[in-house]
């Protein structure tokens, strides 16, 4: 740097020192800022606590106390009172979940309990969980004189926390027992149901629907086959949505129209359905509900109505080649090249790129979603023989993913996957399929 004047050299040195100083200052500022943020988050965390000590889904016992009564609730086949009376499971679960999510702002130096309404609380919950050793005790105290807040006291593992919180319950209680009247006949979710054992009226055969990984199985005395997923989902949704009013029968119920045993591991629930004039009674172990909707046609069905109407079952992403027979002796073969960068896939006929690749993509989608209107049991196989159109789909190892025969007849088309029954579909559902040569 001998060519620089002394004044320029000094200026550069001063600039360099200033830059280094700025970087050091900025680094210290960032470190201090991050420390302050971490400290603020810690203080915020310590400032608040949750009203309920542990996850609401693990709770299996609740004792509700107020100045008038004590009510014991326990989870068995469903939530019940000590006298075995049932309550609305979902409403109790929601109430417990709201308490678990309720943020209570801690009082640092709470005064005497009497002034906070905690010497004789408005309501106290003692909550127990089989996976937690200690119970959680939550008490409701006085209301704030000017704000919509109440005092909450929590005792857990010999520690006490007191603070202010705003309840979501409009009744001003931790749990409103009057709102827990049971109306749900089967307090389960669709995902909890593992199986359905159906015992219909005399004249129809019993059968069972069993959940398997990714599908359902229809089991009859004669065979096992894949059940129709759409039908199963619709029935299960209606089943868990059944609502009714608890009744005390004046006479003993007998000769049910349908008996349904629902498996929800490790338990099973038996429901008997009785049609009486325009009423539908549903009886469980020790309960009888009158259903709000008396229609039972959605459940009174033969085993054959559960058979799979989905034409194919495969993962479209596995496709690497497609073979199309047009039914007149011509065979068109296309291979798929996947774009590794997430762009559009390319299709080739030999070495020739296919410009109409969208038609092959549409074919894949149709194969994945097409459902039959009915199963033609009179036909074991399609009668078109060599005149059938045919579509085969292969993966990278040339394993056959789809092998479907198609017989087009006027407004209808009949399709049959390899090893499956003959299905009737609308002809227009397959008329746009690429049975001709693609360019």
Image: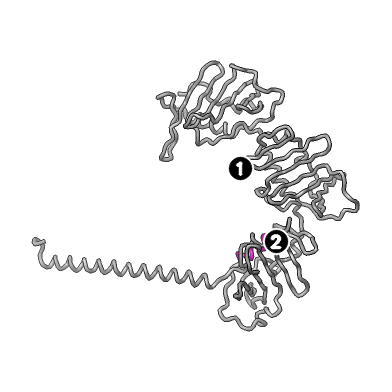
Residue 353, compared with residue 288, is above or below; it is above
Q: Residue furthest left?
A: 2
Q: Earlier in the sequence, mark 1 or mark 2?
A: 2
| Secondary structure predominantly adopted by residues drawn in magenta | helix
Magenta highlight range: 92-101
Q: Nearer the viewer, residue 113 or 204?
A: 204
Residue that protrudes farthest toward the bottom in the picture: 112
> Residue 396 location, x and y as percent?
47, 32
Residue 45 located within the stretch drawn in magenta: no
96 drawn magenta: yes
Q: Which quarter of the rendering shows the N terminus?
A: bottom left
Residue 213, numbered circle: 1
* Crowd class of label 2 (few under 14; some 14 to 19; many from 20; radius 10 Å): many
Numbered disc 1: secondary structure: loop
Q: Residue 288's spot in the image, x, y percent?
A: 82, 53
Q: Tag 2's secondary structure?
A: helix
> Is residue 172 among what the camera can see?
no
Q: Is residue 340 left or right of residue 155?
A: left
Left/right of residue 150 with respect to residue 340 in the rendered view? right
What's the residue at 71%, 51% (across, down)? 267
């Amino acid at each position: 740097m001998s060519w620089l004047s002394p004044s320029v050299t000094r200026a550069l040195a001063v600039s360099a020192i200033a830059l280094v100083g700025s970087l050091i200052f900025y680094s210290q500022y960032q470190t201090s800022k991050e420390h302050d943020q971490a400290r603020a988050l810690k203080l915020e965390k310590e400032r608040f606590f949750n009203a309920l000590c542990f996850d609401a889904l693990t709770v299996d016992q609740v004792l509700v106390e107020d100045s008038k009564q004590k009510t014991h609730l326990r989870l068995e086949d469903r939530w019940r009172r000590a006298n075995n009376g049932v309550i609305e499971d979902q409403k109790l679960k929601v109430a417990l979940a709201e308490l678990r999510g309720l943020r209570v702002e801690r009082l640092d130096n709470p005064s005497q309990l009497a002034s906070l309404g905690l010497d004789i609380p408005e309501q106290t919950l003692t909550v127990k969980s089989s996976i937690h050793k200690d119970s959680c005790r939550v008490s409701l105290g006085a209301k704030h004189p000017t704000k919509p807040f109440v005092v909450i006291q929590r005792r857990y593992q010999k520690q006490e926390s007191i603070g202010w919180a705003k309840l979501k319950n409009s009744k001003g209680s931790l749990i409103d027992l009057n709102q827990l009247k049971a109306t749900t006949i089967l307090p389960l979710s669709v995902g909890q149901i593992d199986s359905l054992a159906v015992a219909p009226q005399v004249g129809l055969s019993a059968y069972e629907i069993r959940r398997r990984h990714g599908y359902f199985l229809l089991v009859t005395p004669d065979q096992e086959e894949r059940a129709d997923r759409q039908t199963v989902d619709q029935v299960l949704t209606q089943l868990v949505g059944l609502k009714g009013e608890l009744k005390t029968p004046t006479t003993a119920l007998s000769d049910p129209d349908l008996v349904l045993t629902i498996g929800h591991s490790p338990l099973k629930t038996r429901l008997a359905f009785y049609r009486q004039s325009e009423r539908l009674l549903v009886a469980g172990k020790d309960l009888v509900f009158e259903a709000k909707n008396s229609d039972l046609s959605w459940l009174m069905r033969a085993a054959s109505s559960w058979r799979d109407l989905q034409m194919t079952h495969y993962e479209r992403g596995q496709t690497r080649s497609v073979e199309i027979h047009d039914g007149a002796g011509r065979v068109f073969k296309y291979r798929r090249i996947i774009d590794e960068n997430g762009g559009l896939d390319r299709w080739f006929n030999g070495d020739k790129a296919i410009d109409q690749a969208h038609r092959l993509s549409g074919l894949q989608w149709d194969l994945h979603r097409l459902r039959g209107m009915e199963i033609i049991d009179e036909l074991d196989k399609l009668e078109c023989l060599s005149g059938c159109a045919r579509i085969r789909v292969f993966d990278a190892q040339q394993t056959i993913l789809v092998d479907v025969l198609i017989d087009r007849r006027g407004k209808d088309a009949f399709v049959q996957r390899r090893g499956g029954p003959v299905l009737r579909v609308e002809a227009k559902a397959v008329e746009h399929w690429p049975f001709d040569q693609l360019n």
